[in-house]
């Protein structure tokens, strides 16, 4: 250069220790570092009044840095030297969103995909969650600064969900929970493409408001509201999403595991098992709903039908109030489908076997295969019980007893007459 005040060139590029190069890469760089240190020193732990001006001050702070948009030899040499110092010395030159100064190796920035327009309104909430999580030191240096430096680790949407939102969700204030979940459900298709693991992560969260009180539940616990499902489940069980969420985000909720056409076998089994403990009118409505569901689902869930054959939830015919004869009943008034006979066989076996209640929904006969042909032993035992009951129990027979006894005996003998063979004859004689 013409003199030491002119630094438009680095002199002879073949000489790495030329005067201008040493001046730029050492002295000028150190002056900038010293200036930045003094700036940070003055504003570390500043009071709330001064903190209001930190955004403008930080903007001015970054203006001191070498500019990535300058590409002349002098600027390039200064940028390289300054960047090298940031990488090797832990200088707290990055102001984070939490209001503290951190060094280059400690900071993260938001991934460029999170700066798209669609995230503009939700981003302040996400930044607050990131800060509360304490997982990352989030900084936002200008793009011109970032271009001067090696790649700064970035926080992706996946990082946000896994490391920030999921661990902290239950501790967030309600409004922040709602803002996050509603945005995710609203943009579910786009976010799912970017992060296929989103479904799995959200299924682990109690994050969807349920009826009737808005309590948060796991998405996979939910069932779509319908007339049939309202008869299967009580609202107080918190199985239905809130009206607002179901009306606004039905597709997203289904993607997260909300049951629609097919309910889990465990749920149906539980409903069947609990049927005897429910008040009579509600039990009848619940039973009809179970049968209606099974009638629609038996092609899809044959194993469910098979397992329910051993669950005591079928209502059986009660003993007539004016009858003294023996009548087979269960303590609860319910029996397993595999134990129950159809009513047309009642007079052949009522003292030995339980009979399907006449009030039972006719559709259940298309779902379950009930017993129709009682074994010979059972019929003969029934006849013996009837013929000896007066002697054994000293019963006082009334008109209803005699009428049923007469009809039953007639039906039993008709049944036996249809069975040919010496074995039947011999066994009847022994009875």
Image (spheres, rainbow, N blue to C red):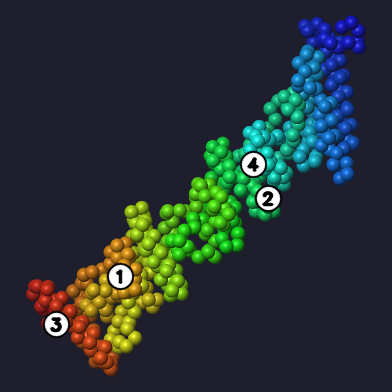
Element carrying mark 1: helix
Q: Nearest to the eye among marks 3 and 4: give it.
A: 4
Q: Residue at x 57, y 53 (%)?
A: 245
Give the quarter of the image for residue 87.
Answer: top right
Q: Which mark is residue 430?
A: 3
Q: Which residue is mark 2?
A: 176
Q: Give residue 262's position: percent from left, percent from top.
A: 42, 54
Measure the C-alpha gap from mark 4 to mark 2: 14 Å
Element carrying mark 4: helix
Q: Which residue is mark 4?
A: 160
Q: How many marks?
A: 4
Q: Is residue 84 visible?
A: no
Element carrying mark 2: helix
In this view, the residue in front, 283 or 221, is: 283
Of labels 4 and 1, earlier in sequence is: 4
Label 2–label 1 contact, CB within 8 A: no
Measure the C-alpha gap from mark 4 to mark 1: 56 Å
Neighbour tally class for label 2: few under 14, some 14-19, many 20 plus, Cα within 10 Å: some
Q: Which mark is residue 339?
A: 1
Neighbour tally class for label 4: few under 14, some 14-19, many 20 plus, Cα within 10 Å: some
Q: Residue at x 86, y 12 (%)?
A: 7
Measure the C-alpha gap from mark 3 to mark 2: 82 Å
Label 4–label 1 contact, CB within 8 A: no
Of labels 2 and 1, earlier in sequence is: 2
Label 4–label 2 contact, CB within 8 A: no
Q: Give residue 269's position: percent from left, percent from top.
A: 42, 62
Of labels 3 and 4, earlier in sequence is: 4
Of labels 1 and 3, earlier in sequence is: 1
């Amino acid at each position: 250069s013409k003199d030491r005040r002119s630094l438009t060139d680095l002199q002879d590029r073949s000489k790495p220790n030329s005067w201008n190069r040493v001046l730029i890469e050492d002295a000028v760089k150190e002056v900038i570092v010293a200036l930045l240190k003094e700036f940070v020193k003055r504003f570390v732990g500043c009071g709330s009044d001064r903190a209001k001006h930190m955004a403008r001050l930080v903007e001015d702070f970054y203006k001191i840095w070498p500019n990535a948009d300058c590409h002349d030899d002098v600027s390039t040499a200064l940028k390289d030297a300054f960047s090298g110092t940031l990488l090797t010395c832990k200088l707290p030159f990055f102001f984070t969103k939490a209001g503290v100064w951190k060094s280059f190796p400690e900071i993260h920035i938001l991934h460029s995909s999170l700066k798209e327009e669609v995230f503009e309104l939700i981003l302040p909430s996400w930044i607050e969650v990131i800060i509360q999580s304490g997982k990352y030191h989030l900084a936002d240096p200008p793009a011109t600064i970032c271009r001067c430096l090696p790649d700064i680790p970035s926080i992706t949407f996946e990082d946000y969900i896994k490391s920030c939102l999921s661990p902290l969700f239950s501790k967030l204030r309600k409004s922040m929970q709602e803002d996050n979940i509603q945005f995710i459900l609203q943009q579910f298709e786009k976010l799912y493409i970017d992060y296929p693991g989103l479904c799995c992560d959200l299924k682990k969260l109690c994050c969807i408001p349920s009826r009737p009180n808005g309590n948060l539940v796991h998405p996979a616990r939910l069932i779509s509201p319908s007339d049939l499902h309202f008869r299967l489940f009580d609202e107080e069980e918190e199985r239905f999403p809130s009206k607002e969420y179901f009306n606004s985000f039905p597709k997203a909720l289904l993607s997260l595991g909300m049951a629609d056409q097919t309910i889990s076998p465990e749920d149906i089994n539980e409903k069947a098992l609990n049927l005897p403990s429910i008040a009579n009118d509600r039990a009848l409505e619940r039973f009809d709903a179970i049968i209606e569901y099974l009638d629609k689902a038996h092609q899809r869930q044959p194993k469910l039908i098979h397992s329910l054959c051993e669950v005591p939830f079928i209502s059986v015919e009660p003993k007539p109030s004016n009858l003294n004869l023996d009548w087979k009943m269960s303590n609860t008034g319910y029996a397993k489908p595999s134990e129950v006979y159809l009513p047309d066989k009642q007079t052949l076996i009522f003292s030995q076997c339980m009979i399907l209640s006449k009030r039972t929904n006719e559709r259940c006969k298309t779902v379950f295969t009930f017993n129709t042909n009682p074994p010979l032993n059972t019929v003969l035992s029934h006849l013996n019980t009837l013929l000896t009951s007066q002697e054994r129990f000293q019963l006082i027979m009334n008109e209803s007893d005699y009428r049923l006894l007469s009809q039953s005996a007639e039906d039993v003998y008709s049944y036996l007459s249809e069975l040919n063979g010496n074995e039947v004859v011999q066994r009847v004689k022994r009875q």
